[in-house]
Amino acid sequence: MTPAGLRARRVGGVGADAGARGGGSAGAERSLLAAGAIAAGVVTASGLAAVVVLVLIGWIAAPHAGVGLPAVLRTSAALWLVGQHAGFTFRGAGRIGLLPLGLVLLPGALLWRAGRWVVRTGRVRSLRHIGYAALALAVPYALLTGALAIASRSAVESSSLPQSVACGLLLALAAGGLGAARAVAPWPEVVRRLPPGPRSLVVAIAGALAALVAAGALLAGVSLASHLGEAATLERDLSPGAVGAVLLLLLEIGYVPNAVAWAISFMLGPGFAFGASTVVAPTGSALRQLPAFPMLAALPPGLHAAMPAWVAPAVLAMPYLAGILGGLLLVRAAPPLSLDAAPLLGLACGGVCGALLGMLAAVSGGPLGDGRLAAVGPSGWQVGVVSALEIGIAAAAAAGAANYLALRRAGALSGWLGTLGTRASAPAVSDAGAACDSAPEADETGHVIYLDPWAGDAPNGRRAAPPGPSAIP
C-alpha cells in the first residue's frame, strides 16, 4: 500500500470513529427522551388505576343514582390532579385550594421510581447529567397532566390547566430528580461529590429543616391528642358508615403534612388563619365557627389563649434552636473558614430555609370557596421573611462562634490575626520621604544597609531626608 493510501485510510478511520461517537451521543439522547416519555406514561396510567379503584369502591358502596362510569372516571382524573396539588373550581361554590399534601406522596413515590428507571435505562453515570434525565421525565409528565385537566372538566367541576401543568412539572422535577440522583450514587456519596461550600450549606439546611419539621410534628400531635375527645364526637356526629369512615381516615392522614406546616408557622410567630379576620398565633387565637371536620377539633372557636403560658417560651425558641443546629452543622461539614465567612454562610442558610418554608406555607393552605373561608392557612411571604430572619441570625451567630473556637483550637487564629496586623502596620510612603522607597538590603557581612534615594538632593521640591541610619558614613 502506498503512503498516500495509508494516510487516506487513517483519515477515514478517524472520521468513522468520530461519526460513531456522534451517533452514539445522539442515540443516548434519543434513548433518554424515549425512557422519560415511557416512564411518564407508566406513572400516569398506574396512578390513575389506583385512584379509579378507590373511587369505584366508594361508588359501589354509596348510592349512585344518576351517576355513571364516565363520572367515576372524571372524578378519578380530578383526584389524580389533586394529588399533584392542582386546585379546582366548583360552579356556584368557588375555588377549592386547601388540598391534602399527603396525597402528593403517591405520585411522588411513582415519580421517584421512574427517575431511577430513566437513569438506569439512559445509562446516566454523572451527577451533572441528572438534570437532563429529570427534564426528560418531567416535560412529558406535565403534558399528560395538562391533558387530564382538560379531559376531567365537567359542567360542575373544572381544574386549572396552567396550575396542573406547572404542578406536574415541578413535582416530576423534584421527585424524579431525587430518584435519579439516588440511582447514580448513595446519598452519602452524592453529598461527598458536592463542592465543599455547597456541601456544608446543604448539610446545614437539611439539619435546620429536619429540626423544625420534627418540632412541628410533635406540636401538632400533642394538640390533636389533647382534643381527641372532641374529634371523636365530631366523627360520630358525621355518621360516615364503614366505607365512609375509611375514606375519612385516609383524608385525615392526607392532611397531616398540612397540620405540620401550620404548626411550623405557629412556632415561627405569624401563625395561620381559618377564614377572614381570624388568626391562630402564639399570642392568642380568634376563630369563628369551624367546619365539622374531626382534625379541626384542635382549634376551638372563639377568643382563647393559644397555649399554656409555660409552653410559650419553649415553642417560640424552636426556630432559634433549629438555626443554632444548622450553624453548628455548617462549621462541622465545611472546610476551614475565615472569621467573616462562617456568619455569612449562616445567613445564607437562613435565607434558603426561609424560601423553602415560605413555599411550604403557601401550598399548605388555600381557599375553601368564595365566602369567609377564602383565606385559610398561613401567609407564605410572612413565614418566609420571619423564618429567614430567625434561622439566619441564629445560624450566623452559632456558626461564627463555633468557627472561632475551631480556629482557636487549631492555632490558626493567631496566624490569621497576625497577618491582618502585618498588613495594617505596613509603612506607607509619604511626601516627606519618611519611609524608604526601597526595601532594606544586606551586604556580604549580613549588616543591614539603609538607603535613601533622595540623599544629597531634593528633586521636585522634596525636602532632604532627616538624619537617620542613611546619613551614617
Image (tube, rainbow, N blue to C red):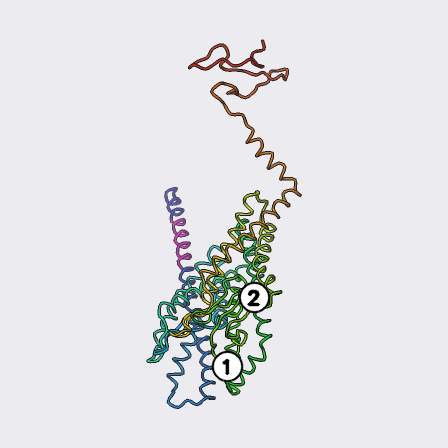
**Tag 2 residue:** 216
Of the 4 image quadrants, the one containing the N terminus is top left
Whether residue 458 is situated above or below residue 7 in the rendered picture: above
Front disc: 2 or 1: 2
- In this rendering, the answer to whether 204 lies above or below 144 is above
Q: Which residues are magenta?
A: 12-26
Callout 2 environment at 10 Å: few (<14), some (14 to 19), or many (20+)?
Answer: many
In the rendered image, residue 47, in percent from the top left (x then y), is placed at: 46, 75
Q: Which residue is mark 1?
A: 247
Vertical comparison of 10 with 179: above or below: above
The type of residue carrying mark 1 is Leu
Identify whether 447 is placed above or below 147: above
**Observer-nearest of 353 and 223:** 223
Count of numbered tags: 2
- Secondary structure at numbered mark 1: helix
Quadrant of the image containing the C terminus: top right
**Which label's residue is closer to the chain start, 2 or 1?**
2
Which residue is more in the foreground, 244 or 32? 244
| Residue 446, position as x, y percentages in the image | 63, 17
